[in-house]
Image: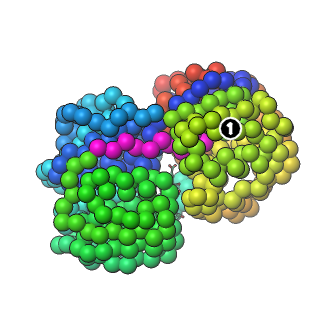
Amino acid sequence: MDRFIIRGGIPLCGTIRVSGAKNAALPCLAASLLSDEPVILGNLPSVRDIRTTCKLLENLGVNFDVPITAGPDPTESEITDSELETPESARAFGEHGRMAVQAANLTNCEAPWELVRTMRASTLILGPLVARCGEARVSMPGGCAIGARPIDLHLKGMEKLGAEITTEHGMVVARARRLRGERIVFDRITVTGTEDLMMAAVLAEGETVLENAAREPEVEDLAALLVSMGAQIEGAGTSVIRIQGKPRLGGAMHNIIPDRIEAGTFVAAAGITRGDVTIETCRADHLQAVIDKFRETGLLIETPTESSIRVLGDRGISLQASDMRTEEYPGFPTDMQAQYMVLVTQAEGTSLITETIFENRFMHGPELVRMGANIRFDGNRAIVRGATPLSGAGVTASDLRASASLVLAGLVASGETIIERVYHIDRGYERIEEKLKAVGARIQRVPA
Ligand code: EPU
């Protein structure tokens, strides 16, 4: 398993470009199951979760050998790569992260345990497969490092749309001859749950209304793709989404939105090293809560254009503590909580961090303490006292965003930090070490 070796203490300077959003790309790839015509996606990030999704879709019979005749304009567990990278999925990545996929002849309707266990988002095929083929068999995901993460709300919603759901041998089986539109009120806000049911509803008979729906930009991006495939959807990006079902959808071309969490991670990297970094090809409006919170700590952040953010970490006042609470969009994202925690270890005073989305998302905390941070944990709250100098140590990545926080800690720590199990970070960050190296970081990947 690869590891990173980081020598900290260098202020980052220069420009970093953000890749496409993993969490938008995953549902958009799943949406290709809804049509027998080609779907051409652009700005797909070359990260492990995308390769896993390709493998999953290949298993279902999706063709990746579709010529990219045209495309959207370029915009700005422990498993090894060789197990996942089939020749087909490797070949499918084109220029500008383009990929053409076609689900003309689906031969299988099952997401097996080997894939679901490495990527919970495999459950995103449930809605589209039932809608298109009348049946889906998805291995029940277990808990993961950050929480139990049940899928009961996906299943309840599918049942409301008329699917018959059974579970046998750890497998959820959903069947319906044709789904029927319904009013569904989510008990709590779920991102992939909203996406799954939106994909089910676009081919259902009649109108579906999703209430208390997730408002994340990734939901809106999926809706944009579905609309260009011919779906009728109103209100994506708000908490009430109205969908008029259609008998069939066509092909489409679509560019994935920039990854707001990758962009936010680079904002934190620039701030924590007191550097001067411009983050390009991002969407500043998708990061408003993050920018506002970082500004509260004293960081000087500018948004020169709609698609760029400049962090003047070398100019602001010394960092000051600030409390933070994770919330659903448009609040501060849970996927930036670990990175924020590292930042406030370098801020004067006490910051109270409250995690409200997942019940076990402080796995990075004890690793940061080993590096010299002063953090106390109390249920879903972490009390960070700063500023404490961090010193390099051997640490272990436990999940995707936790790994990103350890990289940030390594960038500011004195001496050498060795991060084990960086396959977690490869799930969602495209060549993070190369991007950081280009702005001056001393970070090296040491292959297993
Ligand atoms: N929940 C339920 N029942 C459900 C679904 C969710 O109780 O049926 C609970 C979850 O256990 C959690 C809360 O509701 O406590 C919110 O979970 P949500 O369903 O919104 O999370 P998700 O859709 O599984 C997506 C992202 C995560 C991100 C969360 C929250 C994707 C592929 N994943 O997960 O991203 O943290 O939303 O914003 O979109 C990451 O990229 O590192 C990552 C974990």
Q: In the rendered structure, does residue 332 fall within the stretch colored magenta?
A: no
Q: Nearer the viewer, residue 279 or 136?
A: 279
Q: In the rendered structure, does residue 256 fall within the stretch colored magenta?
A: yes
Q: Position of residue 81 (x, y in %)?
A: 38, 34
Q: Position of residue 173 (x, y in %)?
A: 27, 68
Q: Quadrant of residue 243?
A: bottom left
Q: Is residue 159 left or right of residue 153?
A: left
Q: Position of residue 286 (x, y in %)?
A: 55, 49
Q: Is residue 153 left or right of residue 104?
A: right
Please report the bounds of the magenta region as a residue range.
253-267
Q: Is residue 249 visible?
A: yes
Q: Secondary structure at mark 1?
A: strand
Q: Position of residue 295 (x, y in %)?
A: 74, 45
| Residue drawn where x is 53% and y is 24% of the image | 434
Q: Is residue 154 visible?
A: no
Q: Quadrant of residue 204?
A: bottom left
| Residue drawn where x is 25% and y is 39% of the image | 100
Q: Nearer the viewer, residue 36 or 424?
A: 36
Residue on which disc 1 sits: 302
Q: Is residue 308 above or below residue 207?
A: above
